[in-house]
Image (tube, rainbow, N blue to C red):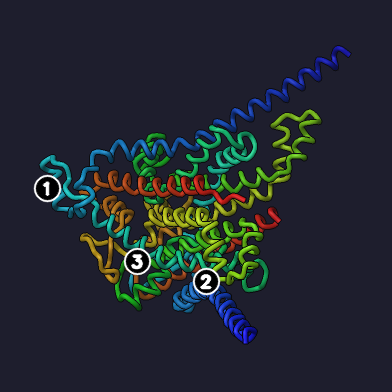
Amino acid sequence: MFKLITTDRQNYRMKSERLFQYFLKLSGVLILMMAIGIIVTLIIGSIPTFKEFGFGFIYSPDWNPTEGRESYGALPFIIGTIVTSLLALAFTFPFAFSIALFLGEYFREGRMASILKSMIDLLAGIPSVVYGLWGFYTIKPIIVELGLNAQGFGIFTSSFVLAIMIIPYASSLSAEVINMVPSNLKEAAYSLGATRFEVVKNVIIPNAGSGIFAGFILAFGRAIGETMAVTMLIGNSNNIPTNLFDLGNTMASLIANQFGEADGLKYTSLVAMGLLLFVLTGILNLIGKMIMKKFTA
Amino acid sequence: MNISNSISQQKLKWRIFNDRLFSIVMMSLAFISALPLLSILYQLIKKGYKQIRLNFFIEVAPDTMEAMMAKVNHEIIPGGIANGIVGTLIIVGMASLIAIPLGLICGIYLSETSKGKMAGLVRFVVDMLQGVPSIVLGVIAYIWIVKPVTSGFSALAGSVALSIMMLPSIIRSTEETLKMIPSTLKEAALSLGVPYHRTIFKVLLPTGMSGIATGIILGISRIAGETAPLMLTALGSSAINLDITQPSSAIPLLVWEFYNDPNLIDLIWGASLILLLIIFLLNLGAKAIAKKWKVQY
């Protein structure tokens, strides 16, 4: 009698346990479906554009919404995005690398490190639109003053602000990687009489190099997707930029500017632009994460 | 002997000089990166503090004519950002309602399933979602919600966009936190005959609460300042709006509106300052929780 009851209860518990596990798994399935849904939605939404222009959409330099002569090409925006982000990455590099060394090697703890760390955290928390305002009211006048550009808008200005926005991303990952360099390697170099600079040059950079690279790739991905600050500063011209001080436009800021009033072919072309942006940032993100994973494993 | 000695002396001096120079350059570059933060804070506080009165929190944004009249008469521009504050609360609150349960459960699933194809795939997808630019999520929410569900711009669509943005960080922080809890704790509960789901909800989750809460708060602070996806979904509204199927304002949207309206432009500083304060307070809160109730084992 007693035994029967316990087996019943055990049965019940086994069932409820399995049910719970299915329940957990269901959340994973939901996330998968969401991701697939995003991709499928973007692809379906951009079909009319690719039907009309084929892959010419990607390399055509013409964005012309005039009715009757409509033609949409993403090239100016792809170039604008990549140039802006690369330039931002170049600006960021010395600063983010210094912060990473500072937090990962020179001052791992202590007051200096915690001050710098909280400042970087705050920098990461500032909304994009506030960066845009700062760029408009603080950086733009300086650029005009220096005579780099008559209006102060353009690729250079937005890259500069973008560079500051991605410092936290690039530096925090790199700091983590630098922190992971085994201390026996560093100690061996010190015991041979190496200076700290020589340890950085000959031990830390060769060991942490790929991880630092991954951190910068992830930051690059961030820069590509940034919208508001760039929209406010780049000048929003639909032509291929000819120099670094020229006006331009990025894929993200084009979507932000024109999506509201778009319909028909223009609308699907903007969705197609979203798809390109998704693919581009997705690839960069995966490369970064893959290198990172190899590093931590 | 003497000569070679002096040469090696010189070399040593050169090496030490290099080392010093490098650390000085590195430290100054690291702290220079914090200057933009100070510049942004200075600008916002200097120009924004005057606007922050009680009325700023309880009145809705003025329309252009009102602001122009006040400007002509050299009065303070009337009105405030109440519609933005309410909108942000509703949109971010709803996004949290969607993202927190799903993210928690998915995080539990990943931490409980360290191997397996399905879990690996979910991890891959979460990594990928983390890199999706916010503007693309705006496009997605537009296609998913604005067109078919609410047939017009709506707060709900904004929440959906922001919830997708928030999910990856909640999932990842939950997973990482739960993985840090030693398996002995779980085994002890299970060996006492506590059912699996109760072990998770009554033992693992409370133990990891601080880490999970920190992740959630950081996720909220990340989406609170988002502007781009809301431009395509919530659109903005000049009145306080509690109906989630109708367009709604949000603080970052108001900053963007003020920026584009020459009569209202003076209000951007107060609005940005409030937005920044909210985000910084959330960040501080997350840090305090992480520090006070650290997961220790």
Q: Residues within 10 Å of mark 1 (few under 14, many from 20)?
A: some
In the rendered image, is residue A88 in sight? no
| Quadrant placement of the C terminus of chain A | bottom right
Is residue B292 found left or right of A263 in the rendered image?
right
Q: Which mark is residue A31?
A: 2
Mark 3 and mark 2 in contact? Answer it, CB < 8 Å: no
> As rendered, which of B93 and B62 lies closer to the eye?
B93
Q: Position of residue A250 (x, y in %)?
A: 45, 57
Q: Residues within 10 Å of mark 3 (few under 14, many from 20)?
A: many
| Quadrant placement of the N terminus of chain A | bottom right
Host chain of mark 3: B
| Separation (CA) of disc 3 from disc 2 | 22 Å
Q: Which mark is residue B233?
A: 3
Amino acid carrying mark 2 in the image = Ile
Answer yes or no: are tags 2 and 1 on the same subunit.
no
Amino acid carrying mark 3 in the image = Thr
SS of the residue under disc 2: helix
Q: Residues within 10 Å of mark 2 (few under 14, many from 20)?
A: many
Answer yes or no: are tags 3 and 2 on the same subunit.
no
- Residue at mark 1: B69
Is residue A26 found left or right of B41 in the rendered image?
right
Mark 1 and mark 3 in contact? Answer it, CB < 8 Å: no
Frontmost of labels 2 and 1 is 2
Q: What residue lies at 65% left-to-right and 43% top-to-bottom? A: A179
Q: What residue lies at 72% left-to-right and 45% top-to-bottom? A: A207
